[in-house]
Image (cartoon, grey):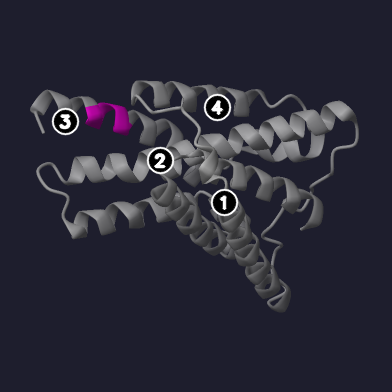
């Protein structure tokens, strides 16, 4: 990798980590949690969504959709729900905090509240798939393995991506961290198998909506 290319990637990676990966560790977003109560227009999710689109353009991502990749959506969704149910059962056994939703969650009531809910969940799911499943692990691997992608670098990059996504949910408790870690593995595997962010993003979106209603 040429020096100027490495520096360019390093600067972009550092900025994204500093402004998008690090903040959830120290200050979980109150405005996002409040959106589960008031269901206002998801302005912050919109900004994150637009940033993820911008990032994909910078990285020259292929936005084309392959309809034959729809099957992994259902497989991914089933695995996500199975994982969620397992941790739900554990939380009940341990009389722990519900890992599936906020304790003050209120279901949308009006048409516009449901519309804002769907928009917010969709944009959040898309953003997280772009940052945590598409960008972070591969960008970190690219920086670590300057000349050759060794197995140890692959392991480190994948492990780091699991940890940053999992501990971004630490404010919800340890069970939520474990649930997020397994969910990341499922979604990352879906991305690696399909080479597309769409199946994981759609499965993530549907999972969030059904979890809101049922869990």
Q: Which badge, 3 or 1, comes first in the chain's sequence?
A: 3
Between the residue at mark 3 and the residue at mark 1, the CA separation in whole angstroms equals: 37 Å
User: Which residue is disc 1 drawn over?
Assistant: 71
Q: Which corner quadrant of the image does residue 202 belong to?
A: top right
Q: Is residue 11 magenta?
A: yes
User: Which residue is disc 4 drawn over?
Assistant: 49
Q: Name the front one of labels 2 and 3.
A: 2
On the picture, is 98 further left or further right than 3? Answer: right
Q: Which badge, 2 or 4, comes first in the chain's sequence?
A: 4
Badge 3 density bin: few <14, some 14–19, many ≥20, Cα 10 Å: few
Q: Dots 2 and 1: beta carbons under 8 Å?
A: no
On the question of residue 61 being in view, the answer is yes
Q: Which badge, 2 or 1, comes first in the chain's sequence?
A: 1
On the picture, is 152 further left or further right than 215? Answer: left
Between the residue at mark 2 and the residue at mark 3, the CA separation in whole angstroms equals: 19 Å
Which range is magenta? 9-14
User: Which residue is disc 3 drawn over?
Assistant: 6
On the picture, is 145 further left or further right than 174? Answer: left
Badge 4 density bin: few <14, some 14–19, many ≥20, Cα 10 Å: many
Q: Which badge, 3 or 4, comes first in the chain's sequence?
A: 3
């Amino acid at each position: 990798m040429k020096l100027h290319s490495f520096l360019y990637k390093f600067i972009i990676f550092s900025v994204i980590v500093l402004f998008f990966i690090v903040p959830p560790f120290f200050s979980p977003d109150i405005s996002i949690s409040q959106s589960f109560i008031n269901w206002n227009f998801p302005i912050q999710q919109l900004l994150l969504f637009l940033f993820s689109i911008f990032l994909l353009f910078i990285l020259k991502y292929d936005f084309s959709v392959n309809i034959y990749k729809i099957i992994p959506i259902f497989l991914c969704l089933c695995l996500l729900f199975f994982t969620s149910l397992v941790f739900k059962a554990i939380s009940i056994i341990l009389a722990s905090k519900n890992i599936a939703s906020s304790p003050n969650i209120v279901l949308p009531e009006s048409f516009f509240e449901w519309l804002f809910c769907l928009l917010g969940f969709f944009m959040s799911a898309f953003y997280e798939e772009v940052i945590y499943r598409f960008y972070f692990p591969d960008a970190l691997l690219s920086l670590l393995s300057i000349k050759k992608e060794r197995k140890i670098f692959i392991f480190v990059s994948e492990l780091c991506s699991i940890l940053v996504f999992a501990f971004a949910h630490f404010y919800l408790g340890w069970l939520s961290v474990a649930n997020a870690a397994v969910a990341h593995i499922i979604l990352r595997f879906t991305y690696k198998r399909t080479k597309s962010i769409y199946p994981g993003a759609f499965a993530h979106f549907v999972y969030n909506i059904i979890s809101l209603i049922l869990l």
